[in-house]
Amino acid sequence: MADRRSVLVTRPRADAERTAAGLAALGLDPIIAPMLEERFTGVALPDATGFAAIALTSANGVRALAAHPQGEEFSALRVYAVGEHTAAEARAAGFDHVSAAEGTLHDLSRTIIADRPSGKILYPAAHHQSGDLAGLLAEAGLTVDMRVLYEMQPATMLPPGLAERLGTGAIDGVVFYSRRTAQIFAGLVASRDYGELRARIYCLCLSENVAQPLIESHFLRIGLADYPSHEAMMTLALAFARDQISP
């Protein structure tokens, strides 16, 4: 029986565990090494009066809002989630009226604009944002109150032992769900010592936007999910596990 291919999971730990379980079920050997660590900012929330909806761009935003001392005041509002994973996290956190867009920021903005909520929209945001949701909604005449409830602290070095495993070819692939995690990982293996790694390792990416920092850093083996969803990433990983795409 062939050895199981090992795959690095770069997502924040709470999301990485779910991804790792899916990869293991496909016959891969997942190794969790988060490139980002979540930290809540403690920024105050406004009074919930006058708000009609919440816009959520990630599961991290769900967790930050649910953990906030004032978060429960918003639990009865309609929630617009960027995708099904974020929607599932919101339901699990106690939000009852949740709908999911199709996985991208622009999908989410189009969904909200089409519905046109009758009051203000709360946007629990990260310190670093991959797009301008508040700006897109404001351009459509919607009122958005963005509060930076969390920030994702980047890893400054590879975990102990991981650098050696990467350097010796003991890890076959890496999964990337966000552009920022790809950018951080690329920065941590930017030295000449990792030149062979960048040519050899297979990068499984949620989208072309996620893959862009890897392309710019001269990683040569990059696969894209057919659709920006967890399910599509598992389909890509299955092809990798079955040797239907080259490592």
Image: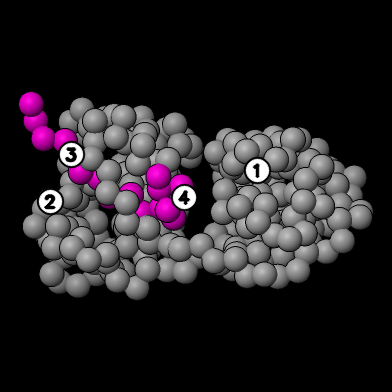
Instruction: Give how far apart the Cα atoms at labels 4 and 1 are.
Output: 14 Å
Q: Quadrant of the N terminus?
A: top left
Verify CB contact (< 8 Å) between mark 2 and mark 4: no
- Magenta-span inclusion, residue 172: no
- N-terminal of the pair, mark 4 or mark 1, is 4
Residue 126 sits in quarter: bottom right
Verify CB contact (< 8 Å) between mark 2 and mark 3: no
State which mark lies toward you, 4 or 3. 4
Number of residues whose C-alpha sits closer than 10 Å to that of mark 4, classed few (under 14), some (14–19) or many (20 or more): some
Q: Give the amino acid type for the residue marked by disc 2 in the picture.
A: Ala
- N-terminal of the pair, mark 2 or mark 1, is 1
Which residue was labeled with disc 3?
5
What span is colored magenta in the figure?
1-17
- N-terminal of the pair, mark 2 or mark 4, is 4
Instruction: Tell how many labels.
Output: 4
Q: Quadrant of the C terminus?
A: top left
Label 1's element? loop
- N-terminal of the pair, mark 4 or mark 3, is 3
Residue 150 sits in quarter: bottom right
Label 3's element? loop
- Magenta-span inclusion, residue 15: yes
Label 2's element? loop
Q: Specify the label residue 93 is tagged with.
A: 1
Label 4's element? helix
Residue 81 x/y as whole percent? 65, 42
Which residue was labeled with disc 4?
14
Which residue is located at x 78 percent, y 45 percent?
A: 75
Which residue was labeled with disc 2?
170
Q: Give the amino acid type for the residue marked by disc 1 in the picture.
A: Ala
Residue 115 x/y as whole percent? 80, 38
